[in-house]
Amino acid sequence: MNFIGKIESVVEGLGKAASWLLLILLGSIILQICLNYLGSSITWMEELQWHLYGISALLSLSYTMTGNGHVRVDVIHQKFSVRTKQVMETLWILFALIPLYLVTFYFGLDFSYESFLRGESSPEPGGLPYRWIVKSFISISSLLLIVTALLRAILIWSKPDLLNTTEIVHGD
């Protein structure tokens, strides 16, 4: 397996793990609803739901990039030549996506580091401790998205047929 394939495998593994987090999220929501009907509530479970949702959404960004699943206006995109698509996609990656996620990575690091230094936890009684863990996923997902975007920029020049599909492709 080549270097790009290994990185894609890691990202796909994290994306699939994120999908399992959604199953755990669903179970905790159902349990929380049942507890509410019984007149009880668990604060940490409500917070866990937000954390699981956030982590799964953040990890899904890079997973979606590896499978060509991000939104674009295909009606316009399909009319361009392969060369034009390659140039447009590369410019978008280099001058829009990567700068945005470099900024997100930088501020996400500061955000999670400050949370770690303060020992930030939930202000609610019975809430979750260690808020820096969930906040660190902002930087982790930003870095993963930068890496997968760069890989995509390389792949669209070596495999131009990737630009002609509107299907989401994983695990090839």
Image (cartoon, helix red, strand yellow):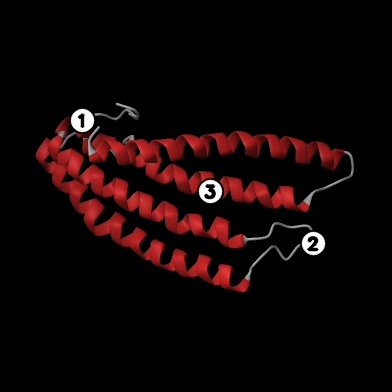
The answer to which quarter of the image holds residue 95 is bottom left
Q: 145 or 165: which is nearer to us?
A: 145
Location of residue 25 in the rendering, given as x and y in whole percent from the top left corner: 64, 39
> Is 111 drawn above or below residue 84 in the view shown?
below
Q: Residue furthest right?
A: 39
Callout 3–callout 2 Cβ contact below 8 Å: no
Callout 3–callout 1 Cβ contact below 8 Å: no
The answer to which quarter of the image holds residue 100 is bottom left
Image quarter in which the N terminus is found:
top left
The answer to which quarter of the image holds residue 79 is top left
Q: Which mark is residue 55?
A: 3
Task: Name the residue rendered at 45%, 40% in the picture.
Answer: 14
Measured in 3D between alpha carbons, the distance from the residue under mark 2 to the one under mark 1, in whole angstroms, is 53 Å
| Dot 2: element | loop
Q: Label 2: few (<14), some or many (≥20) within 10 Å? A: few
Q: Earlier in the sequence, mark 3 or mark 1?
A: 3
On screen, residue 96 versus residue 142, left or right, reads left
Is residue 143 shown to the viewer in this render? yes
The amino acid on which the numbered mark 3 sits, given as a three-letter code, is Ile
The amino acid on which the numbered mark 2 sits, given as a three-letter code, is Pro
On screen, residue 157 versus residue 112, left or right, reads left
Location of residue 34 in the rendering, given as x and y in whole percent from the top left corner: 81, 36
Q: Which residue is mark 1?
A: 164
Give the mark toward the camera: 2 or 1. 2
Q: Which residue is mark 2?
A: 125
Measured in 3D between alpha carbons, the distance from the residue under mark 3 to the one under mark 1, in whole angstroms, is 31 Å
Q: Earlier in the sequence, mark 2 or mark 1?
A: 2
